[in-house]
Amino acid sequence: METLLTSASYLLDYHIIIAALIGVTWGIIGGALPGISPSITMALLLPFTYSMDPTAAIVLLAATYVGAEYGGSVPAILIRTPGTNAAAATVLDGYEMNKQGKAGLALGISLYSGVLGSLFGLTMLVVLSKPLSDVALSFTPPAYFALGILGLSVIATLSGDSLIKGMIAAVLGLMVATVGTDPVSGSTRFTFGSSDLLGGIAPVMIMVGLFAMSELLVQVSQRGDVLKVNSRPKIEFPSLKLARRLVRPQAIGGVIGTFEGVMPGAGGTIASFMSYNEARRWSKYPEEFGKGSPEGIAAPETANNTVAETALVPLLSFGIPGSNSTAILLGGFLIHGIVPGPMLFQRSGEVVHGLYAGLFVAAIGLLFIGMALLPVCIWIVNRPRPYLNAFIFALILSGIYSIHNSLFDLSIMMAAGVIGFLMRMLKFPFLPTVLGLVLGYLVESSFRRSLVVSGDNYSIFFDDRISLALLSVSALFIFGSIGKRIWDRMRRNDRKTFSEGTDG
């Protein structure tokens, strides 16, 4: 109750209100652009948050995440192209409703479910974050090291089809994290005589390059016609009878979205498809799914908007980003010298309470701004791709240059963009790189401080109970992921053998 009252007091801060509304607006527009994910939409804003008040800056980025999750459903419904990965499940029934002349109702269900999902996710965020952070207050240097390892172990579940590629990507991030000044001895490392590298490479440069610049390079390297939106639908909200029917799939989406959000590495895409599948399983009208079922929109949209809030739980409580978007948000924290994790609520409690208030404003604002921005989203989707690319390129350059007025920053960002482009072409995941970049300092400094305390006795990591528990969970993540890969490969081989035997 005290947390709610304190957070409610921040609703009177116009800086937070303005930041939340701007973030939601930008997020909806960015999410409505096919290929521009929530993380890219957030990365484009990241450089501009340097000069902002820390609380307003965090609210701006978090609200952008919330808005982008809804914005992705607009092109999914209208042109059968999900604006975000999490909106892929919405395509299945959303576009079918559009073909039936019910595009306005489909958009209304998406918006209505998104607002409910955001409010439910915010409730879970408030309920879960503080207790988990209280548990983490007893952390010692070995425990912090184990926490960093736990964060890096998420790589095992985020590496796609190749664990080796995920490990390579993570090592790349860890290598970048070592540039600058040694955290213990104070000596310089890998600066090559450049004074610009004495303070290390700011994560914002790498994140903007990897996510935004590389996507821009991919866009300009591809050719193809973009589908157009010919109609001008108006958002139509469900009737009371239909709203009652949607309660069950929305509840399913909320529960699954909460579970997937707090699990690092899961994310909105998995939550959306799981919710869609379970909603069909428990529906009274399963035959309508895939043919324009309103439940097939309500479940995944509730889920991915719930994830946008609950994904902040591991970030705030332990400092572990479980997705690309929360990694960008972590970058926003670090820009202002705020370290998410066990001490966040004690050292920067005002930022957390301001964030809660901003997310509430964002969830409510999503309803009204979503209705107002539909014509704008349709207009933007219909613009020629070169014009949009030019605008994004100008935004990237101006944002990075404005941080330190440095051409060196631009060169770092461009280099990261080229590396990101090559990683996309070779199908390397980005999140392991970002995890290595942002967790590298925590892992290295905690590891070396632990050894200093113990006199180079490595048993300190196993004598500390919290450290031992976290390392055990890390091992479960890693070996569980490896076991799943082996099992999936065996099943594929069995199906292949059966298919060949049948053909023979």
Image: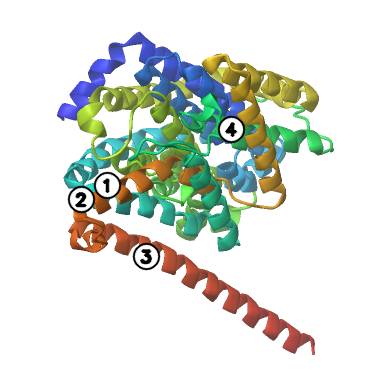
Image location (x, y in percent) of residue 137 = 18, 42
Which of labels 2 and 3 is toward the front? 2
Decide: marks 2, 1 in contact (CB < 8 A)? yes
Crowd around label 2: few <14 · some 14–19 · many ≥20 (10 Å): few
Query: To which quarter of the image does residue 410 belong?
Result: top right
Say left or right for 462 vs 490.
left
Badge 2 element = helix
Front-lying residue, 66 or 483: 483
Q: Are marks 4 and 1 in contact (CB under 8 Å)?
A: no
Query: How far apart are labels 4 and 1 at the CA level?
Result: 36 Å
Residue 400 in sight in this render: yes
Viewer-nearest of discs 3 and 1: 1
Query: First in sequence: mark 3 or mark 1?
Result: 1
What label does residue 475 carry, if any? 3
At label 1, the amino acid type is Arg
Secondary structure, mark 1, is helix
Of residues 19 and 479, the one drawn nearer to the viewer in this rendering: 479
**Which amino acid type corresponds to the residue marked 2 in the rendered image?**
Val
Above-or-below relation of 243 to 475: above
Q: Residue at x 46, y 52 (%)?
A: 266
Tell me the tag on residue 390.
Answer: none
Give residue 453's mark. 2
**Which is in the foreground here, disc 4 or disc 1?**
1
Q: Tag 4's secondary structure?
A: helix
Does residue 291 appear left or right of residue 474 in this picture?
Answer: right
Give the labeled residue for mark 4.
40
Camera-near label (3 vs 4) is: 3
CA separation, marks 3 and 1?
A: 23 Å
Name the residue tied to disc 1.
449
The reply, left or right, for residue 358 in relation to residue 387 is left
Q: The disc labelled 4 sits on which kind of residue?
A: Ile
* Residue at the (47%, 65%) spot, across then down: 481
